Image: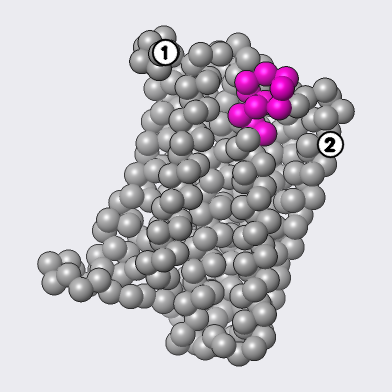
Amino acid sequence: MTEIALASPSLSTRSRKIPGNMAIWAAILAEMSEFAIMFIVYFIAKVHNPEIFDEGPTRLSTLAGTSNTLIMLSSSFFVVRAVIAMRKNKPRTCMRWLWAAVACGILYLIIKYFEYQWNDSQGLSTETNIFYAVYYYVTFNHFLHVGWGSGAIVWVIYRLNTHIYTQQEHEGLINIALYWHMIDLAWITIFPLLYVIR
Amino acid sequence: MKEMSQIKRINTLWVILLLLTLFSAYMAERATPGLSSIVIMAIVLAIKGRIIVDYFMELKEAHTILRTLMQLYFYVIPALIILVYLFPEQIVKWTTL
């Protein structure tokens, strides 16, 4: 990935590389901390309400949760392939991989929408109990991230179309790729906590 | 050659991530709840997180602090999953106002 180096002579070359730029890492670390707080809230609520949290995942759609996990992981993979294509100076191929990632983002949002509808038909809502309150708070927050993350990838595709990125200089693409991987990391943590562990 | 092997590695890691997810789904539906399934779930999360951090984000060879912070996340959360299962009463005591 595009790299910048910190001006610290004590660090070896290997340990100085930073993919993307510092601004995107500030955003990523802030968002990871935000999700960490939500996970801590989940753990605390779980120990105080063990029966509710044991029963909660059994009423959610494992199929929807699993499908969205497969989709998020695939979208991250497509983004990696897009970056590799750009490094090989293949902007058209890069664009195709990015569109595949956007398609995954949209599919994720559609599945989530139908999952919420399905929950609703089962009589589940934010007020059912504390498990579903946590579930809706965390997953809707993540839903928004996927929404604007997909929009950001579309922006990168537009920039690719205007030939702003080159084989040597495509930091904007790297930054969005990193941000998208962060959204993926949040989801792979949400999946076991809300859908699997009981 | 180097680029080809990088693509091959990324493709393989993607398949591993998908298989681990399907395994988790199987565990969700079939496994008997207990310490062993909790530990397996925690390990699966740790592996998935580490693959994305090291290879998708390309932090394996990156700045030490950044790499450590991101890798640490996928030690701490899996560890919390196990600790919350093992010591719920203790954590209730610590988190009761």
* Corner quadrant of residue A135: top right
Looking at the rendered image, the disc whose residue lies closer to the viewer, 1 or 2, is 1
Task: Name the quadrant of the C terminus of chain A.
Answer: top right
Residue A145 located left or right of residue B81: right
| A63 in relation to A186, above or below | above
Give the x, y percent position of residue A46: 53, 20
Is the Cβ of the residue at disc 1 closer than 8 Å to that at disc 2?
A: no
Secondary element under disc 2, as helix, strand or loop, is helix
The residue drawn where x is 54% and y is 85% is A165
Q: Which residues are magenta?
A: A126-136
Q: Can residue A184 be found in the magenta stretch? A: no
- Mark 1 vs mark 2: tell me if same chain: no
Query: Is the magenta region chiefly helix, strand or loop?
Result: helix
- Marks 1 and 2, Cα distance to the nearest angstrom? 35 Å
| A16 in relation to B90, above or below | below
The residue drawn where x is 36% and y is 48% is B71
Q: Can residue A128 be found in the magenta stretch? A: yes
Residue that badge 1 annotates: B96
Give the x, y percent position of residue A106: 75, 57
Looking at numbered disc 2 in the image, what kind of residue is underneath it? Gln
Query: What is the chain letter for disc 2?
Result: A
Residue closest to the eye, A36 or B86: A36
The residue drawn where x is 71% and y is 58% is A104
Q: Is residue A6 visible?
A: yes
Mark 1 Cα within 10 Å, few/some/many (few <14, many 20+)?
few
Residue that badge 2 annotates: A117
* Corner quadrant of residue A67: top right
Query: What is the chain letter for disc 1?
Result: B
